[in-house]
């Protein structure tokens, strides 16, 4: 599971300072492979990167939008149901012009909507077979194509939680529910009505840098027919990776703490912010593995208030696959480090770029020389 090859999609990204929305990945130009999109806060502009081959990606400007000054979360979703992947981010969604194969520099239309925040993700909430947009850290969803706001009643009193895929059927009733740190919100049937709140045993990090924050993924980890919750702590040092085993349709849970990755040579002990998470069969052996990556981030200013730094000073960020060395029905996860030091990982997306499950990620707050957009090609199968 250590066979990954790194390529730069963009080095450097446009803009000089910290903060980038996305990435989102989809076949934007309809040529059969995945492209990537990212926005930059300093330029208030989104860009899509056309994949030519693994080592060549061509940048095209999407559109300017003042909402991008506060963008972080981003997802690809066909908002207007025209068959082309659009992109939703902080308070704005961009309509794919549909002719990018012939005219890749065609501007995308920017459309405002009343949602955003740290987490923006896609999932079918109303049961019509088409993805909707979940935003405001899971406190609201927006049905496509009208993008009208529907509150879930879920509090947004944490830094992050449902992204990148904390949406799925927890109680087995056929409806997609939404995961937040320490609670899951039960879909009333078509997303409209009262969303009941149920607890699950999330373990918060004491003195976390930015308060409670997770990345989450709903998946049936142990193949028992019930969806579990895989989650990583993020936006704080001393983060870890876990899976919460669903024992009784969301009523009873057992937390499994995954072993921390080994310390890299020349690094220091401890862990940083696992701000990237993905669950997939990365080695094509028939069971689910777990990816998480620590972010680059030199932030230590919060330590004066007794909070943790974003990572222990001197820590070399790692990309890690927790390989399932058990079985499909009885998983046992072993950490395999495939990337050490820069570039780190922030809000990575997983998808099939070249034939299996690959990783696309960006830099949020660099502790290296440049802000970059990165592609890791999976060569493990």
Image: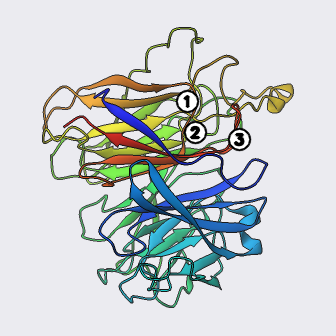
The numbered disc on residue 365 is 3
The reply, left or right, for residue 61 in relation to residue 352 is right
The reply, left or right, for residue 202 in relation to residue 344 is left
In this orientation, does residue 201 appear?
no
- Measure how far apart labels 1 and 3 are at the Cα level: 17 Å
Q: Are marks 3 and 2 in contact (CB under 8 Å)?
A: no
Give the percent coordinates (x, y) of residue 265.
51, 9
- In the image, 48 versus 287, the foreground residue is 48
Q: Nearer the viewer, mark 1 or mark 3?
A: 3
The numbered disc on residue 58 is none
Q: Closer to the N terminus: mark 3 or mark 2?
A: 2
Q: Which residue is mark 1?
A: 239
Q: Which residue is mark 2?
A: 234
Give the percent coordinates (x, y) of residue 94.
57, 79
Q: Are marks 1 and 2 in contact (CB under 8 Å)?
A: yes
Q: Closer to the N terminus: mark 1 or mark 3?
A: 1
Above or below for 236 versus 125: above
Residue drawn at x 25%, y 68% as measured from the top left:
173
- In the image, 333 versus 154, the foreground residue is 333
- In the image, 343 versus 239, the foreground residue is 343
Give the percent coordinates (x, y) of residue 234.
57, 39
- How many marks the image carries: the answer is 3
For label 2, count other residues whose C-alpha is less than 10 Å away and answer few (under 14), some (14-19) or many (20+): many
Quadrant including the C terminus: top left
Q: Closer to the N terminus: mark 1 or mark 2?
A: 2
Residue drawn at x 34%, y 23% as measured from the top left:
336
Of helix, strand and loop, which one carries label 2?
A: loop
């Amino acid at each position: 599971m250590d066979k990954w090859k790194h390529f730069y999609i963009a080095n450097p990204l446009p803009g000089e300072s910290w903060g980038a929305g996305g990435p989102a990945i989809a076949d934007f130009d309809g040529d059969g492979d995945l492209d990537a999109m990212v926005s930059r806060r300093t330029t208030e502009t989104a860009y899509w990167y056309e994949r030519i081959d693994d080592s060549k990606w061509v940048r095209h400007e999407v559109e300017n939008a003042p909402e991008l000054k506060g963008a972080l979360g981003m997802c690809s979703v066909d908002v207007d149901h025209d068959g082309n992947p659009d992109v939703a981010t902080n308070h704005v969604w961009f309509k794919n012009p549909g002719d990018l194969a012939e005219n890749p520099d065609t501007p995308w239309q920017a459309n405002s909507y009343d949602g955003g925040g740290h987490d923006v993700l896609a999932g079918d909430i109303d049961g019509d077979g088409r993805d909707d947009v979940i935003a405001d850290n899971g406190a609201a969803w927006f049905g496509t194509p009208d993008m009208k706001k529907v509150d879930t009643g879920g509090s947004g009193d944490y830094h992050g939680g449902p992204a990148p895929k904390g949406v799925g059927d927890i109680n087995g009733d056929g409806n997609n529910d939404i995961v937040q740190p320490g609670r899951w919100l039960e879909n009333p049937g078509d997303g409209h009505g009262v969303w009941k709140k149920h607890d699950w045993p999330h373990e918060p990090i004491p003195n976390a840098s930015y308060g409670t924050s997770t990345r989450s993924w709903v998946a049936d980890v142990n193949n028992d027919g019930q969806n579990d919750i895989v989650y990583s702590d993020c936006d704080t040092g001393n983060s870890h990776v876990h899976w919460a085993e669903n024992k009784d349709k969301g009523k009873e849970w057992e937390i499994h703490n995954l072993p921390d990755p080994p310390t890299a040579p020349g690094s220091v002990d401890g862990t940083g912010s696992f701000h990237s998470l993905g669950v997939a069969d990365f080695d094509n052996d028939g069971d689910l593995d777990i990816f998480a990556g620590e972010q680059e981030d030199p932030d230590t200013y919060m330590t004066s208030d007794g909070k943790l730094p974003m990572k222990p000073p001197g820590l070399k960020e790692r990309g890690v696959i927790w390989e399932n060395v058990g079985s499909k029905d009885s998983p046992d996860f072993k950490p395999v480090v495939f990337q050490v030091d820069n570039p780190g990982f922030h809000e990575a997306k997983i998808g099939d770029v070249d034939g299996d499950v690959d990783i696309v990620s960006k830099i949020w707050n660099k502790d290296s020389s440049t802000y970059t957009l990165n592609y890791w090609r999976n060569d493990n199968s």
